Amino acid sequence: MNYYGWTELGERPPLIYDGKLYSTGAGGVVYCYDLDNGDVIWTYESTDPYQEYLFANNWWQFTLWIVDGKLYSGHMEHSAIEPIPRGAPFICLDAQTGEEIWTAPGLFRSTRWGGRGIMGDSIMVTMDTYDNNIYAVGKGPSALTAQAPMSGVTVGSSVQITGTAMDVSPGTQDLGRTMRFANGVPAIADEDMSEWMLYVYKQFEQPNVDGVEIVLAAIDPNGNYMDIDRTTSDMYGNWALAFKPEMEGTYQIIAMFEGSGAYFGSTATTYVTVDPAPTPATPMEPEEPEEPEVPTEPTEPSEPVETAFITTEIAIIAAVAVAAVIGVAAYWFLKRK
């Protein structure tokens, strides 16, 4: 079926790279031949899971270019089929092994009439016949932010550093993106990039993806550099990491995204001022409880003491008796004289 790719006409000639010849066509199979003996080293079949492409069960392929040991191939639009078949692949293969490095079904539908894609300065440019836009694909810029509490941080207490990791490529500033992503487009892990680009640029369903790795470091109040930890931003572009300062003064916090295959790196800084730990209140010593009185052994009751009790009548009788005695004594005294 390679014959039907018109390779003999020179419009889509086979590619030669590192002693190998690469050919494909309407059959939707990429072949890698050994130039010394013609042996087939590997093949790659670009199947159409929806079976919507009318000419075959595979997507008609044509090779675009080979760069850095990678072969790029796309589906060639030939006839104006309506409705347009879904999921036309754009493929990147290992030129030595034929292993699929990445693919993005439905992201770019190339064209025979509109001209083939090109690559320069590590950026590939191609037309997409799904929306008739021209796309430039390559490593894009990123933007990192970092924030920390402005006050209330004390020695030994944990403080949470937060921030965002965003994709600020020119394409994200297009009206179609800014209306859907009012807070910006998050930066996403390389392994999720195909699904993410379909979501961002072609309005596919939002996938479950990972963000990018953020490295946190600090310069302490004495000017010493210290590593804090690493974390990963989420699919919304947010990240957070706890940090426990161990001395008073101002720390400079440095957040770094070291970059990836999809993004150039970026850096952000913030500051944390650490106050002394609060002086603990002196605890009041508890009052010692009074010792309970030890009950004494009961003593034997003593003999009851009779209390003298003089009534009025007894007093009168006593006075009369005394007077009588005095009278008798006086009588005898006078009589003796």
Image (cartoon, helix red, strand yellow):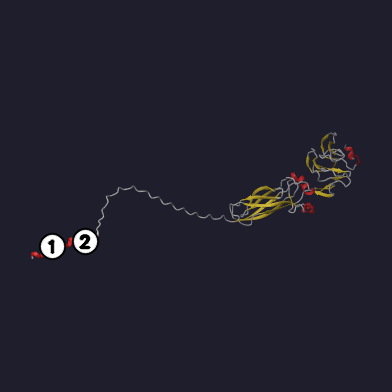
Q: Is residue 229 above or below residue 275?
A: above
Q: Quickly name the residue at label 1.
A: 329
Q: Residue furthest right?
A: 9
Residue at x 23%, y 59% (from the top left corner): 313
Q: Quickly name the residue at label 2.
A: 316
Q: Residues within 10 Å of mark 1 (few under 14, many from 20)?
A: few
Instruction: State the quadrant of the N terminus.
Output: top right
In the structure shown, which secondary structural element does the residue marked by tag 1 occupy? Answer: helix
In the structure shown, which secondary structural element does the residue marked by tag 2 occupy? Answer: helix
User: Decide: marks 2, 1 in contact (CB < 8 A)?
Assistant: no
Query: Quarter of the image holding residue 6?
Result: top right
The amino acid on which the numbered mark 2 sits, given as a three-letter code, is Ile
Which numbered marker is on residue 151? none
Residue 251 percent location from the top left of the image: 63, 54
Residue 199 percent location from the top left of the image: 77, 47
The amino acid on which the numbered mark 1 sits, given as a three-letter code, is Ala
